[in-house]
Image (spheres, rainbow, N blue to C red):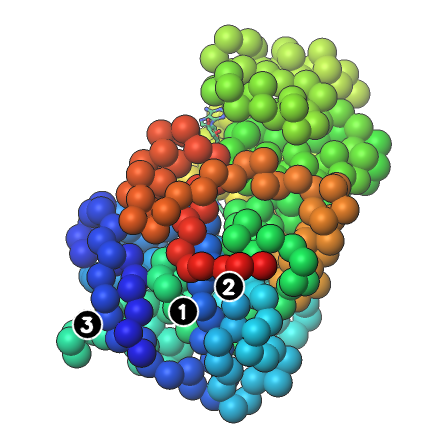
Amino acid sequence: MEITAAIVKEKGGDFELVKMNLDEPKNDEVLIKIIATGTCHTDMAARDLLTGPLSFPMVLGHEGAGIVEKVGENVSNIKKGDHVVLTFGFCGGCSNCQTGIPAYCENFGALNFGGARLDGSHSHHIHGEVVQDNFFSQSSFATYALAHKNNVIKVRKDAPIEYLGPLGCGIQTGSGAVLNSLDVKAGQSIVISGGGAVGLAGVLAAKAISAGKIVVVDINEERLKFAKELGATHIINSIKENVAEKLKEIEPKGFDCGLDTTGISPVILDSINALRSHGKMGILGVAKKPLDIEMNSFVATGKQLIGIVEGDSVPNEFIPRLVNMYMNGQFPFDKLIKTYKFEDINQAIEDSEKGITIKPVILIGEYKG
Ligand SMILES: NC(=O)c1ccc[n+]([C@@H]2O[C@H](COP(=O)([O-])OP(=O)(O)OC[C@H]3O[C@@H](n4cnc5c(N)ncnc54)[C@H](O)[C@@H]3O)[C@@H](O)[C@H]2O)c1
Ligand SMILES: [Zn+2]
Ligand SMILES: [Zn+2]
């Protein structure tokens, strides 16, 4: 079928809306009419060749939400008309998938960054020319997308489908880091560095489970004020204040947990140093330099450092749970979103990179609920 997709043709290039051909779904695949797709920094990382696919043209987009149009022969859990959120690809068969940690699927790289299906085939073509696709098993900056049945998550129909896409990556990552990876309990304290889409989703999750002190560290005054509106009990502007001293003052006995979304070594170390003995530190940002830990004090205090992919989510359970929390008013992640028209996708990306918009969502298809 003919679709319109946003393609990137060169490293760091703009997105361009182009008509192209999309194949019919294979046996395990689902065809989705995309209603809206969030943008995430990983789209920009792929555009800049920091991660795969490693050639052009490519169709990105990995926070898609829409309505099922058609399913392949082997798809029984999803049917035409279902409302769905598209999440990361996982194989379902490897030992990590089988033990309930699909974010660490042994085929994660190939299924999300390979630029093609696992068997090397492509579903998008421009006049016969191959397009790098299957980004996060979806390539959802497009009017229609093909996904594997594993990463198509059915959601309730009374939820606003146009806002739900970011639950497939950024929002799921921040909230899952707090609820799953760090397993923060009611009353426990947490310091979150980086109050962007991921960090603020962490704040919302911490508030939802009645965490104790919730501290956000950032360099952007507006974001810090916003973090406070969302539920942070304390904010620290690291340009103006001494973070180490301030954290000590806020929680003299040390924090139960830390979550870093900046990927910056000195920022992470401030939080690690502020943990209590045996406290847990989660890291998930894309880093440009190594983490420089003073090992002896780290070892002596039994602190735990945890790498996190996609908030350790089991998407079939976690995404519907987040939708329920949202519908109950416990997880108002829509406050982070600003919507853009499909033709304004470059503006959305620019606003995200400049820190003007926290979570852009691109409205792609019509839906009358
Ligand atoms: N591991 C995963 O599964 C996963 C999933 C999604 C996103 N990510 C990554 O998570 C990271 C965060 O994503 P995001 O969408 O929230 O990004 P973002 O740009 O919206 O947020 C980052 C925040 O960090 C702040 N910041 C920058 N330098 C700082 C400093 N020195 N001290 C304190 N704060 C500082 C910025 O002002 C911004 O508010 C990105 O690297 C993204 O690629 C990882
Ligand atoms: Zn992402
Ligand atoms: Zn797997």
Distance from Cα at disc 3 to Cα at disc 2? 23 Å
Q: Secondary structure at mark 1?
A: strand
Q: Locate the C terminus by quadrant.
A: bottom right
Locate residue 128 relative to residue 123 in the image: left or right: left
The label nearer to you, 3 versus 2, is: 2
Q: Residues within 10 Å of mark 2 (few under 14, many from 20)?
A: many
Tag 3 residue: 126
Q: Residues within 10 Å of mark 1 (few under 14, many from 20)?
A: many
Do the numbered discs 3 and 1 sit on residues whose CB atoms are within 8 Å? no
Locate residue 25 relative to residue 86 in the image: left or right: left
Task: Identify the mark nearer the N-term, 3 or 2.
Answer: 2
Q: Which of the 4 image quarters holds residue 234?
A: top right
Q: Which mark is residue 145?
A: 1
Rendered position, 35 above or below 21: above
Q: Secondary structure at mark 3?
A: strand
Say which residue appears at 44% left-offset and 33% top-offset: 357
- Horizontal and vertical percent position of residue 1: 31, 78
Name which residue type carries label 1: Ala
Say which residue appears at 30% left-offset and 69% top-offset: 3
Say which residue appears at 70% left-offset and 27% top-offset: 231
Question: Which sits in the foreground, 157 or 16?
Answer: 157
Do the numbered discs 3 and 2 sit on residues whose CB atoms are within 8 Å? no
Q: Which of the 4 image quarters holds residue 247?
A: top right
